Image (cartoon, rainbow, N blue to C red):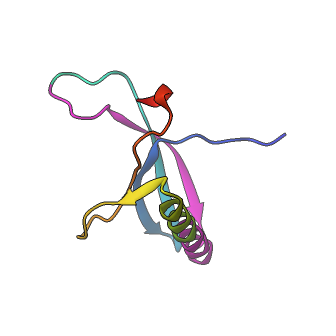
Amino acid sequence: MKEYIYTDGVDSITLAGGMVRLNLFHYDGSPTEEQQELPRVVNQQLVLPPAAFMRAFESMQRFVEELEKSGVVHRNAPGRNTTPTPAKAISPNFE
């Protein structure tokens, strides 16, 4: 049986003991009026040798390019943070 891991994102990436460590988080609870975002809870850590991290990074870069070409995501304005953002929902079910 396959095990699937769900994460809302990567909280931090560090290099320790010669291994790349990605701290994965999930959002928890409900935001208060002062909060712009739900609280994050680090719940798992993915540990990779640097070569495996680089292969994963290259695979993700290629996949992001495919998503951009298909219109699923769009790059933000040029600058330091060039994280792609989801495109507007096409289905009326998600508007």
Which of the two residues, 36 or 90, is positioned nearer the viewer here? 90
Where residue 33 sits in the image (x, y, percent)? Answer: 17, 22
Q: Quadrant of the C terminus?
A: top left
How far across and down, in percent of the image, does residue 14 sit? 42, 64
Residue shown at the point (56%, 55%) measured from the top left? 46
| Image quadrant where one finds the N terminus | top right
Quadrant for residue 73, please give it. bottom left
| Magenta-tinted stretch | 34-60
Query: In screen coordinates, is 24 left or right of 31?
Result: right
The number of numbered discs placed on residues in the rendered structure image is 0
Horizontal side of residue 95 vs 2, given as left or right: left
Question: Which residue is situated farthest in the bottom direction here?
Answer: 51
Residue 49, placed above or below residue 95: below
Residue drawn at x 25%, y 64% as measured from the top left: 77
Instruction: Name which quarter of the figure residue 60 lies in.
Output: bottom right
Q: Is residue 64 left or right of residue 28?
A: right
Q: Quadrant of residue 5?
A: top right
Q: Residue furthest right?
A: 1
45 versus 54 height, above or below: above
| Residue farthest left in this picture | 34
Q: Residue 62 location, x and y as percent? A: 56, 71
Horizontal side, residue 75 vs residue 31: left or right: right
92 or 23: nearer the viewer = 92
Looking at the image, which is closer to me, 46 or 74? 74
Whether 48 is among the magenta residues is: yes
Magenta-drawn stretch contains 65: no
Using the image, determine if residue 45 lies above or below residue 56.
above
Name above or below for residue 1 compared with residue 29: below
Residue drawn at (58%, 40%), measured in percent from left and top?
6
Where does the image place residue 50, in percent across and percent down from the top left? 56, 75
Q: Identify which residue is drawn at 79% across, 43% down.
A: 2
